[in-house]
């Protein structure tokens, strides 16, 4: 019986992780995410409402490499500037929605 219960819990956890979006996955791997998984889920929900999936994958990279965010922010590229504005809008929405 214990093995069956453990297998069910493991299946549910694996399904949850598999369904996690790129922002949530990156957040959960970060130091803060380990302490606040609900916060990571909230941030992903906001990302789903405000960012395209490609933008989410790009923004998720900032968790592992914060310097990359600065490079995008300072980039003279119009595409980077447009992405940065979407990213700022996402960040503002997440800050307002996902207050701990």
Image (spheres, helix red, strand yellow):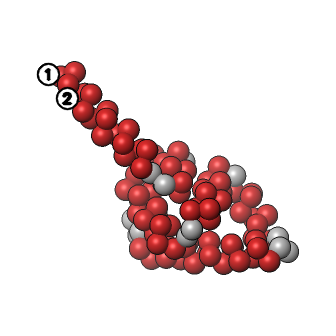
What residue is at 74 percent from the left and 57 percent from the top? 67
Q: Where residue 21 appears, x then y in whole percent?
A: 48, 54
Identify the residue at image location x=61%, y=57%: 57
Front in this rendered view, residue 95 or 85: 85
Looking at the image, can residue 35 be seen?
A: no
Q: Residue furthest right?
A: 76
Within 10 Å of the Cα at label 1, are there few (<14), some (14-19), or many (20+) other Cα atoms? few
Left or right relative to 61: residue 38: left
Crowding around mark 2 (Cα neighbors within 10 Å: few <14, some 14 to 19, many 20+) is few
Q: In this view of the protein, which residue sits in the foreground, 99 or 38?
A: 38
- If the image is split into quadrants, where does the C terminus sit? bottom left
- The residue labelled by disc 2 is 5
Would you identify the image quadrant in which residue 3 lies? Answer: top left
Query: Whole-percent x and y of residue 14?
Result: 38, 38
**Relative to residue 73, is residue 33 drawn left or right?**
left
Secondary element at image label 1: loop
Q: CA distance from mark 2 to mark 1?
A: 6 Å
Q: Which residue is mark 1?
A: 1
Lateral position of residue 60 relative to residue 48, left or right: right
Q: Position of residue 68 (x, y in %)?
A: 74, 58
């Amino acid at each position: 019986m214990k093995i069956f219960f453990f297998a069910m819990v493991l299946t549910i956890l694996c399904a949850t992780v598999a369904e996690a979006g790129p922002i949530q996955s990156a957040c959960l791997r970060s130091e803060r995410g380990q302490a606040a998984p609900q916060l990571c889920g909230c941030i992903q929900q906001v990302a789903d409402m405000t960012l395209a999936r490609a933008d989410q994958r790009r923004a998720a990279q900032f968790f592992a490499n914060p310097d990359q965010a600065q490079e995008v922010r300072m980039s003279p590229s119009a595409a980077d500037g447009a992405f940065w504005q979407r990213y700022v809008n996402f960040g503002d929405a997440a800050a307002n929605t996902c207050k701990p």
